[in-house]
Amino acid sequence: MTRTLIHGGLVITASDEVHADVLIEDGRIAALAAPGVLTADRTIDATGKYVIPGGVDAHTHMELPFGGTFASDTFETGTRAAAWGGTTTIIDFAVQSVGHGLREGLDAWHAKAEGNCAIDYGFHMIVSGVDEETLKEMDLLVEEGVTSFKQFMAYPGVFYSDDGQILRAMQRSADNGGLIMMHAENGIAIDVLVEQALARGETDPRYHGEVRKALLEAEATHRAIRLAQVAGAPLYVVHVSAMEAVAELARARDEGLPVFGETCPQYLFLSTDNLAEPDFEGAKYVCSTPLRPREHQAKLWQGLRTNDLQVVSTDHCPFCFTGQKELGRGDFSKIPNGLPGVENRMDLLHQAVVDGHISRRRWIEIACATPARMFGLYPKKGTIAPGADADVVIYDPHAEQVISAETHHMNVDYSAYEGRRVTGRVETVLSRGVPVVTDREYTGRAGHGVFTPRSTCQYLD
């Protein structure tokens, strides 16, 4: 194997910023040293650039079936786009179909991903039905490195679990070390509000946000926290969008409970103004939890600064405007829920550094280190340290770019951030020491990325 040296850059991790050269050998970080000390067969010049860990996006949905269609990114196109955006590991969601076992669902997702990914990947398991067989399978999956399980308080008739099912799964995870991830919205109440809105003729995309009320996100978040407390289990609440839900998380953490929260770039940068765009354009921004009024953004940023929110993932679940989002013309409840974003996360969060919302180290913490720790991948992923996988991004903090569907690599016909100018751009990306993006040229290949088993949540050791 050749030795590669990344020379002259500012190495940024969650804990440190240091001018150092990074030596890579056999796909791993071999050493960090003062500039000029180390030599290698190949040198990458990072002068004037940041050298950062590859991003860990702990919430993606490639090829997800939803509402009679499928997310438009395959594992091949989605992981390639992730690499372009400086993300070198995704954790996707395998789905248990109603009436089928966890194993069957996991095997189906392995078949979709294997041999197709440009970067490394892991799986969470969506639990759609809780019975004795499911609970036993949870134990087996934890042993195999699938150590987190997602449940839904939303989507009755599809993924929904009632409080009893949730409690049973939480009790099991308390025993086997797994982590329950919760989609916290009161789906039973939301369905009533959807029915009432449609009966009034309120069919436009903006009503998607109005019926999925912030209070029903907060109520479900509170209920999930208390169920987890009863079960003696940790809890990770996904895609937190409402300030009232942040307040519930903050209160639980102040009580010393092992409760964690994730938000996404769409809630930090977009709002109900987008949902209200005319001519059905608002459909592009339909996702659940929904976009909130702009005043929620400040509380989400505050939550990220105070560590009441620990992770920013994308919930990448793209549907094309033409032919997919359009399924909901005349009925907002039929618009497939989801936004594209796996390629934009690292850049948008760097813009947050430029704008003064977060520090550089906090950028790396919420996008790389904490998701790796939360889901049992650290320090293999999420940092630059001897022994870590050589998942490394050379990042130009001064380059300007305009986000656009014209230039992105996601397999979707629009960008949620169309026309947004950001400062900072990925230049070169290494995955386990192999260049997948080289000086803004794609040099990766499908099948380089491998399934990565995970240990249990590293915040609970």
Image (cartoon, rainbow, N blue to C red):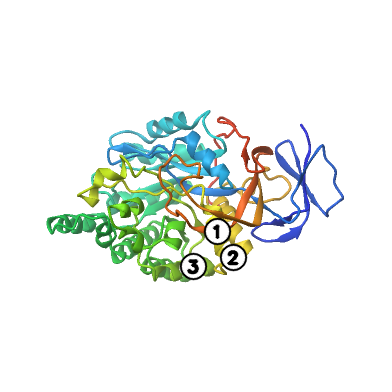
Judging by the rendered image, the residue that carries numbered circle 2 is 354
**Residue 150, image x and y in percent?**
39, 47
Please state which of the two labelled residues, at mark 2 or mark 3, is closer to the viewer.
Answer: 2
Q: Sequence order check: which comes first, mark 2 or mark 3?
A: 3
Label 1: which secondary element: strand
* Residue lying at 52% horizontally and 42% vertically, measured from the top left: 81
User: Could you say which is closer to the camera, residue 373 or residue 10?
Assistant: 10
Q: Are marks 3 and 1 in contact (CB under 8 Å)?
A: no
From this viewpoint, which residue is outermost toward the left? Answer: 199
Quarter containing the N terminus: top right
- Cα separation between marks 2 and 1: 9 Å
Task: Tell me if I can see residue 158 in this picture.
Answer: no
Is residue 347 shown above or below 304? above
- Crowd rating for badge 1 (residues with CA inside 10 Å; few <14, some 14–19, many 20+): some
Quarter containing the C terminus: bottom right
Judging by the rendered image, the residue that carries numbered circle 3 is 301
* Residue lying at 54% horizontally and 38% vertically, measured from the top left: 80
Judging by the rendered image, the residue that carries numbered circle 1 is 422
Please state which of the two labelled residues, at mark 2 or mark 1, is closer to the viewer.
Answer: 1
Task: Tell me if I can see residue 15 in this picture.
Answer: yes
Q: Sequence order check: which comes first, mark 3 or mark 1?
A: 3
User: Could you say which is closer to the camera, residue 312 or residue 158?
Assistant: 312
Label 2: which secondary element: helix
Amino acid carrying mark 2 in the image: Val
* Residue lying at 32% horizontally and 60% vertically, measured from the top left: 220
Amino acid carrying mark 3 in the image: Trp
* Residue lying at 34% horizontally and 58% vertically, measured from the top left: 290
- Cα separation between marks 3 and 1: 18 Å
Amino acid carrying mark 1 in the image: Val
Q: Are marks 2 and 1 in contact (CB under 8 Å)?
A: yes
**Residue 320, image x and y in percent?**
36, 42
**Residue 205, image x and y in percent?**
27, 55
